[in-house]
Amino acid sequence: MAKTSKTLKMPTLFKKKKEMWGPTVPDLMLGLSLAANLIYTAWKVRTQVHMLQQNSYRNERYLNWMRKNPGRAFPPKDLLPFAALLTLFWSSLNLAVLIWLLIYVYLLVTVDKTPEKKKLVYTFRVKRLLALLAVVFLVWLLFLVSYAGPAVFFAALVLTNAAAPFWVLLGNTLIRPVEIAVQDWYYRDARRKLAGMKGLKVIGLTGSYGKTSTKHILAKILAAKYNVLMTPESYNTTMGVVRTIREMLKATHEVFVVEMGAMQRGDIKELCDLVAPQYGVLTAIGEQYLETFKTLANIAQTKFELVEAIPEG
């Protein structure tokens, strides 16, 4: 007697039911349901990569963000598709997949459409991370298709989607050696470029708030006499400044205004080690990022890393 395979085979997953679906509807329904799941998963991953970028690609900061924002990292509604799996215990697989599809359409329609204050920047680093995650997910999907039964297959997809933040953490960890090597090369290239511009005046600018507006005002005033470059938008991290130097700084620039952001002790010093500012502007010291810095004294000491880096005289 021939053995019946428990493996999920896409073309033959559905058999004709009494409901008289028709010969191609089941496979079409399966394809649509999987597409809806993949689209929603892609949206979730993109959102979490955005949050990772906002936390400087540092896993510890991203984990801290997850702890403080559990509803954004793990929305309870992401577990709704499990309701479709319950129908497998009392009804057909066709009905379960139909409910699954309807739930994912609902999830896609109700995604948060609030405009982002700071959009995801599709840097080469983000593209590398997304490409790696796509490969990892594809391998995982092929494994499920080859070895999982229908219930396990769909349950695994739901959990994969709900656990998107952990997939992003995994991808960020796996690609870290590559990123360290790439960043080191970019950093040294930026340092070489700055070293070759002996007459360039560098102004560091930091503060708990008012940095960006002060940067624009200062650049506009100086532009009346000098050829000025300022770091664009909120490019206030080390790699953001490195990118500005490599892509935008020209030999004709006379003044470079560098906005310096910080989320922990040493961030401002790291930026100062890169650009070696001759002048500094400190806008204000306040309680922004107090949860990260713990005390106002730590915030003040971090901001004063700029003051300590300015050469005397």
Image: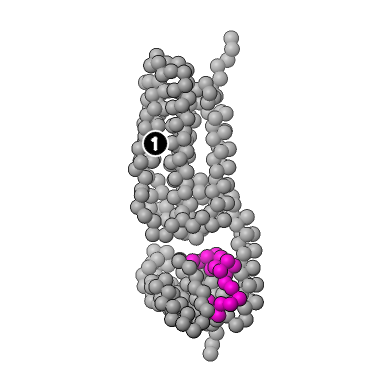
Q: Which residue is mark 1?
A: 104
Query: Which image quarter: residue 159?
Result: top left
What residue lies at 52% left-to-right and 79% top-to-bottom?
227
- Residue 255, magenta (yes or no): yes
Q: In the image, what residue type sits under mark 1?
A: Tyr
- For label 1, the SS is helix
Tell me: residue 176, above or below residue 269: above
Within 10 angstroms of label 1, few (less than 14), some, or many (20 or more) residues?
many
Please provide percent x and percent y for residue 134: 55, 43
Residue 22 appears in the picture as rendered:
yes
Who is closer to the viewer here, 20 or 261? 20
What residue lies at 64% left-to-right and 68% top-to-bottom?
189
What residue lies at 52% left-to-right and 65% top-to-bottom?
240
* Quarter the N terminus occupies: top right
Please provide percent x and percent y for residue 234: 45, 66
Q: Residue furthest top?
A: 1
Q: Magenta part of the protein: which range?
A: 234-256
Please provide percent x and percent y for residue 163: 46, 43
Tell me: residue 242, above or below residue 74: below
What residue lies at 62% left-to-right and 81% top-to-bottom?
198
Who is closer to the viewer here, 254 or 154? 254
Which color scheme is applied? one colour
Residue 151 appears in the picture as rendered:
no
Tell me: residue 56, above or below residue 272: above
Q: Is 190 on the left or on the right of 83, as rendered?
A: right
Q: Is 297 on the left or on the right of 197, as rendered?
A: left
- Residue 53, magenta (yes or no): no
